């Protein structure tokens, strides 16, 4: 028997028991005649003690143990004189009488501690060691519990989990596909699913009216902290259901998770905000509403004062930093630098202070007198002592920059509390997005999203104005998931493909089976998919989804531990009928 107990369960009630424990050496300390070893496993840490006076040979053995050795120790549980009240096992220790080294360990490349000395790269390379750390263990346990609660809730709601294939044909979620060559069909490739979108719609047509799946999806796109080339979705679809049904059912899921995992209950429904209002009020379609500081627009007040930057701008708007009129020149310059970063891309920033003495001061006093500035303050809903930060330019771009500035101010003023959660639905997304570069429309969500029925006539006359029955769930500024009511009419679907620039042949070639399926009795249906990694990261308070994935990839899409992607042998390439363009592989 390797162990009678884990390293996390013994306490004062067990005093006197003979026990066997197995685990890793977390650390050891020699204090005079005693040696103490912290023994660690998944469940916790238990202190082992060796006494030079009573058993010198054993104590000498113990002194030879290095960090991360795997050992087995047996002995008696006894009360500790120097108790550690921070851990459940801190009241006891094991007076060891036999010690067995199950496997020695090389000195680990970084310390397996909460506060480790290992950098990101090193910890990625030795991920299996990093996973021994408490933070990682807690993340993976959280992930497991969330998946369990999701299954429990959906099961109660009559959803069934159905697996869909991983080797498929391109799905149009807007990213590049990862592809897999087919040896048996030379020159042909499978695509890995960007989502199970098409299959879940087909399942609705097959009559499985409540489907879900916790499923890997693959998108070949540039990576950021909240993106991985392979990630996990909680993918769901309902038939005989529309937007309202989906929002209610999955608001229920969100509330269930908040309750079970975070012990937080929400009274009343989550707020809902239309896409356009989200842009006007927060400058983003994923607003963090833990704090106010909403955007205000000044475009109508700023023209005609001979200040070209504002005169020429499509949009002038700002945010009100309450009680910040005392900001120094340096603090303001620093914010200006912040908005001028290439990622944010503002060309400059105008500020205005409402001083305690009632006067206004701004960086554009040359152009705007006190009366004009007062109007700004009124529009901003400002009070004495406030500071307005103002940007100008193209509408959407400037609103997005203001959104970043707002979040930065939220951080600097410590308005974003980690233990607070502010979920909301963003609804009424536009169906289509125009792209100036390729001069065509793109589906804002995906091509199967249904327009609002009342907007269908606009598809002919003014497609850009058409709103979709689409929705996103946002928590603390993170897009946790999104979905839509679907088109279930083959003709409308064809029209949609046409608007998106597919010829009839292309649409038929790529999605012919779906259009055909619509002709065999497709029920109305709607669905949603949640980014599971993101949801876990938000609950874990992590900035990066990598922290909640056991074996993630780095920003270059590499797994540093298994060293992948890697080259294929000539024989494998030959079998697949693939030739690698050496030029193409050189960076
Ligand atoms: N397939 C969509 C996505 O991955 C979600 C959905 O519409 O259900 O974003």
Image: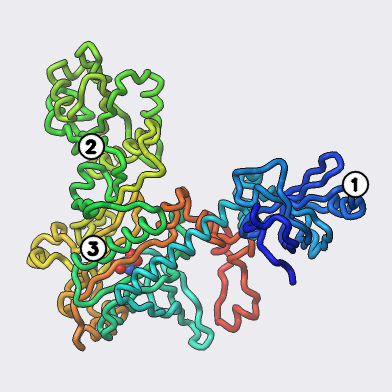
Residues at marks 2 and 1 touching, judged by CB atoms closer than 8 Å: no
Q: Name the one closer to the observer, 104 or 437.
A: 104
Residue at the far top in the pictured view: 357
Residue 443, compared with residue 274, is above or below; it is below
| Residue bearing mark 2 | 295
| Image quadrant where one finds the N terminus | bottom right
| Image quadrant where one finds the C terminus | bottom right
Residue 121, compared with residue 31, is above or below; it is below
Earlier sequence position, callout 3 versus callout 1:
1
Q: Name the one closer to the observer, 16 or 61.
A: 16
Measuring 36% from the left and 57% from the top, which residue is drawn there? 259
Measuring 58% from the left and 60% from the top, which residue is drawn there? 586
Q: Quadrant of residue 18?
A: bottom right
Q: Name the one closer to the observer, 510 or 400.
A: 400
Measuring 39% from the left and 61% from the top, which residue is drawn there? 531
Marks 3/1: CA distance?
69 Å
Instruction: Residue 206: give x, y in percent of width and height.
Output: 28, 86
Q: Quadrant of residue 252?
A: bottom left
């Amino acid at each position: 028997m390797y162990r009678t107990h884990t390293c996390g369960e013994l306490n004062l009630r067990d005093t006197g028991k003979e026990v066997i424990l197995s685990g890793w050496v977390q650390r050891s300390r020699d204090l005079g005649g005693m040696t103490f070893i912290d023994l660690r496993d998944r469940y916790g840490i238990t202190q082992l003690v060796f006494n030079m006076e009573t058993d010198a040979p054993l104590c000498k053995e113990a002194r030879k143990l290095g960090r991360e050795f795997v050992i087995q120790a047996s002995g008696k549980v006894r009360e500790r004189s120097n108790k550690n009240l921070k851990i459940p096992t801190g009241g006891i220790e094991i007076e060891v009488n036999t010690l067995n080294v199950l496997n020695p360990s090389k000195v680990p490349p970084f310390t397996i501690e909460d506060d480790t000395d290992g950098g990101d790269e090193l910890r990625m390379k030795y991920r299996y060691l990093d996973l021994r750390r408490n933070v990682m263990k807690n993340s993976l346990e959280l992930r497991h519990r969330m998946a369990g609660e999701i299954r429990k809730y959906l099961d109660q709601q009559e959803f069934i989990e159905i697996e869909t294939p991983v080797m498929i044909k391109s799905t149009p979620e807007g990213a590049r596909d990862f592809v897999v060559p087919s040896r048996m069909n030379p020159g042909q490739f499978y695509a890995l699913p960007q989502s199970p979108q098409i299959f879940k719609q087909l399942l609705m047509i097959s009559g499985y009216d409540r489907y879900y799946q916790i499923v890997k999806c693959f998108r070949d796109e540039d990576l950021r902290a909240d993106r991985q080339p392979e990630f996990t979705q909680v993918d769901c679809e309902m038939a005989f259901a529309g937007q309202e049904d989906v929002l209610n059912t999955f608001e229920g899921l969100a509330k269930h998770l908040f309750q079970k995992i975070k012990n937080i209950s929400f009274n009343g429904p989550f707020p809902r905000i239309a896409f356009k209002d989200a842009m006007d009020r927060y400058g983003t379609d994923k607003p963090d509403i833990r704090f106010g500081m909403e955007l205000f627009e000044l475009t109508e007040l700023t023209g005609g004062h001979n200040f070209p930057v504002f005169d020429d701008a499509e949009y002038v708007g700002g945010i009100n930093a309450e009680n910040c009129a005392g900001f120094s020149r340096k603090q303001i310059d620093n914010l200006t630098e912040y908005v001028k970063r290439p990622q944010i891309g503002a060309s400059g920033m105008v500020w205005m202070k409402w001083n305690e003495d009632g006067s206004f001061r701004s960086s554009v006093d040359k152009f705007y007198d006190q009366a004009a500035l007062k109007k700004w303050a009124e529009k901003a809903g400002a009070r004495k002592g406030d500071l307005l930060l103002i940007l100008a330019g193209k509408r959407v771009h400037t609103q997005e920059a203001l959104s970043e500035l707002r979040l930065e101010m939220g951080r600097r003023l410590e308005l974003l509390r980690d233990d607070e959660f502010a979920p909301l639905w963003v609804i009424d997304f536009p169906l289509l997005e125009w792209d100036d570069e390729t001069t065509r429309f793109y589906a804002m969500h995906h091509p199967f999203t249904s327009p609002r029925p009342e907007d269908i006539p606009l598809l002919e006359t003014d497609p850009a104005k058409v709103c979709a029955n689409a929705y996103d769930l946002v928590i603390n500024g993170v897009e946790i998931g999104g979905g839509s009511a679907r088109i279930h009419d083959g003709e409308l679907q064809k029209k949609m493909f046409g608007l998106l620039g597919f010829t009839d042949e292309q649409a038929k070639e790529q999605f012919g089976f779906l259009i055909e399926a619509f002709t065999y009795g497709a029920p109305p249906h709607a669905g949603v998919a949640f980014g599971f990694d993101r949801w876990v990261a938000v609950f874990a308070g992590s900035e990066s989804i990598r922290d909640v994935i056991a074996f993630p990839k780095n920003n270059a899409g590499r797994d540093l531990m298994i060293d992948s992607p890697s080259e294929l042998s000539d024989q494998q390439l030959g079998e697949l009928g693939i030739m690698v363009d050496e030029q193409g592989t050189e960076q």
